[in-house]
Amino acid sequence: MLERLEAEAIQASDVVGMSFGDLGLGGNIVAALAELGAPSPFPIQAATIPDVLAGKDVLGRGKTGSGKTIAFGAPLVEKLMENGGGKKRAMGRKPRALILAPTRELALQIDRTVQPIARSVGLFTTQIYGGVPQHRQVGALQRGVDIIVGTPGRIEDLIEQGRLDLSEVTITVLDEADHMCDLGFLEPVQRILRETADNGQKLLFSATLDKGVAQLVKEFLPEPAVHEVAGEDQASSTIDHRVLVIEQRDKGRIIEQLADRNGKTLVFARTRAFAEQLAEQLDDAGIPAVSLHGDLNQARRTRNLAQLTSGRVSVLVATDVAARGIHVDDIDLVIQADAPDEYKTYLHRSGRTGRAGKQGTVVTLIPKQRQRRMAELLERAEIEADFVVSFPGDELVSQIAGHTPVNA
């Protein structure tokens, strides 16, 4: 199975004293990275950059925010410099590198990092995504760019219009490939990749490596160098995984007991109605809580998330659809009020805590009859978790959260 491909591991101790220059990056790029607040490489960058510079295809497991934008962006720019780079700034030149992202927000985030690195050596980037008029994007292509950062839909639109030619693209990056496949972009991505230069280099990053991602790897990355992004291993010692076997009638009271603490808590509920119910129950119990789900308009969703980020509330109860993309660094407890149906959902949920090397706890509540199914899911996710029979008032429930109760 692809998700079990053996990854090259590199520890923080392995890169002590190492510089970006040691990895093969030029002086202008090293200086640009320092200005971006990256004076020395993270482990994933130290692992990935030499492979990219060597022309290898790279398959990386990891999520946004783990340092991988520099891991692919900096060597991508260096590789373009090998063939004349900024010396060939002809009007209307075809792009030679492509970075695909699933959403406009991620494309913008990537470009904010890659653009100053590219500019440091005389190369130019442009963003191509939907939801806005295309005339500015077309104008940039007519002037000539070196690196495109964009989303599959608009990129394919411009190819079909004859306004975008990818035939000279020799390096392609797929970031958050699993999310692209989940959004239905598998076939567009395949078509786009086939438009790039034959035998071009491919760099693919994904939190999980199954289904659609497996098809991409099989067709476009036959023998990749595989790396695990530092800090994104869900079985990491920074995350404590617990499964509480409970009676269904006790669920609400146990969630209250878990959430009655100092610190930020994220609760996952399967339905919008249950998310609202839990948020109201916790609030009534004196535990400040708000909900996040698809029935709320964007302004309300933004406001509720901001309340958790600012600390005005301590608990956010969310459905999976609404919770995709939540990045609050100091969530230290995730409660799965409803167990997930697949391991990818478990990985997504648990990835909301234990970020940047901080400690986090993931607690999943299940009925007795679900124990075997839960064990199989955890095995597929390569996660070890303790199963404990629990009930309201159980001292262990309070110990799991690891904090003094707010209402003690």
Image (spheres, grey):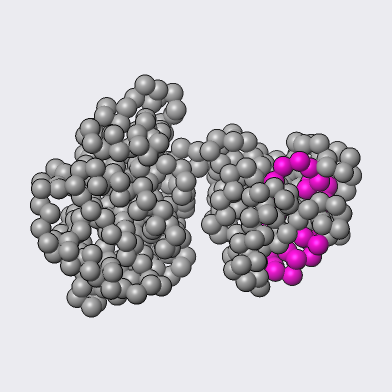
In the picture, measured across the screen, residue 237 lies left or right of residue 195, that is right
What span is in magenta? 256-280
Quadrant of residue 52 in the image? top left
Residue 395 image position (x, y, % from top left): 86, 38
Image check: 78 left or right of 3? left
Identify the image quadrant of residue 8: top left
Q: Residue at x 63, y 36 (%)?
A: 359
Q: Residue furthest bottom?
A: 161
Q: Is residue 83 left or right of residue 293?
A: left
Residue 97, x across and y down, in percent: 23, 55
Observer-nearest residue: 216 or 48? 48
Direction from residue 40 to residue 285 in the image, left or right? right
Q: What's the residue at 56%, 51% (across, down)? A: 327
The answer to whether one can see residue 251 in this image is no
Assess whether residue 276 is covered by the magenta stretch: yes
Residue at x 23%, y 53% (from the top left corner): 124
Location of residue 25 by image quarter: top left
In this rendering, is residue 17 above or below 169? above
> Residue 191: x percent and y percent?
28, 69
